[in-house]
Image (cartoon, grey):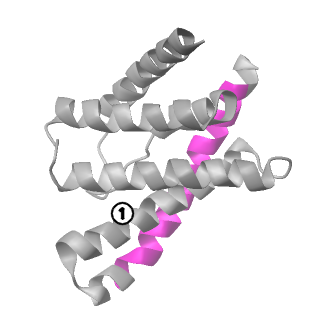
Amino acid sequence: MQSQDNLRIALLSAFAIGLHALERLIPSPVPWLRFGFANIIVLVALVIYGFRVGMMITLVRVLIGSLFIGSFLGPGFVLSLSGGIVSTTAMFISIRLFRAAISPFGLSIVGAFFHNLTQLLVAYVLFIRRLDAMLYLAPLILFLGIITGSINGLLALSVIKRLG
């Protein structure tokens, strides 16, 4: 079973890394806005295979993806890693607490919210240190995260239905 999990992690991570790299080619109306399409793979893995596989894909995607795009150990890497770990954990906790009441759509919104909230907190603590700027940006970032989380949730739901 362990080798089967490793194969799943490797294949799904490769797909997530590919989506992560491709997304960088999509022009963004705001420099820091990303759809987070690679998180669809994390969500699908989390729902179908569980926390261990979902978290491993998150970690591998952030580490390898940052090496590919040249952001390893930079601010973007720190923000992506912290957001990924917290959002994957928040989605897992939501599955545990609300299994019968929450869909992949709802999980994706939870993940997007916690991903962005974590990034705001980490950016404040490590980089920005201006509470007024963070409070000004927070509503917009969290709102846009809910929109992108909704889109990703619908896509993840479609993938899960096709696989299941």
Q: Quadrant of residue 157?
A: top right
Q: Residue sitting at 52 percent across and 55 percent down?
A: 112
In the rendered image, which quarter is residue 13 located in?
top left
Q: Position of residue 75 (x, y in %)?
A: 19, 56
Find residue 54 and report its horizontal and vertical position in percent.
53, 35
Tell which of 143 and 124 is nearer to you: 124
Q: Is residue 150 magenta?
A: yes
Residue at far bottom of view:
132
In the picture as drawn, the residue positioned furthest to the front comes out as 2
Seen in the image, is 119 located left or right of residue 64? Answer: right
Image height of 31 relative to 159, above or below:
below
Can residue 148 be seen?
no
Q: Which residues are magenta?
A: 136-160
- Quadrant of the image for the N terminus? top right
Residue 74 in picture, x, y percent from top left: 15, 51
**Where does label 1 land, which residue?**
119
Q: Amino acid at mark 1?
A: Gln
Q: Residue at x 70, y 18 (%)?
A: 163
Quarter of the figure with the C terminus? top right
Q: Helix, strand, or loop for circle 1?
A: helix
Q: Determine crowd level at label 1: few under 14, some 14-19, many 20+ residues with C-alpha closer than 10 A.
A: many
Q: Total number of numbered labels?
A: 1
Q: Residue furthest right?
A: 100
Residue 66 x %, y %: 23, 37
For the question of whether residue 82 can be seen, the reply is yes
| Magenta stretch prevailing secondary structure | helix
Which residue sits at x=61%, y=57%? 110
Per the image, is 155 magenta?
yes
Say above or below: 40 vs 143: above
Above or below, 20 against 74 in this view is above
* Residue at 25 percent of width and 56 percent of height: 31
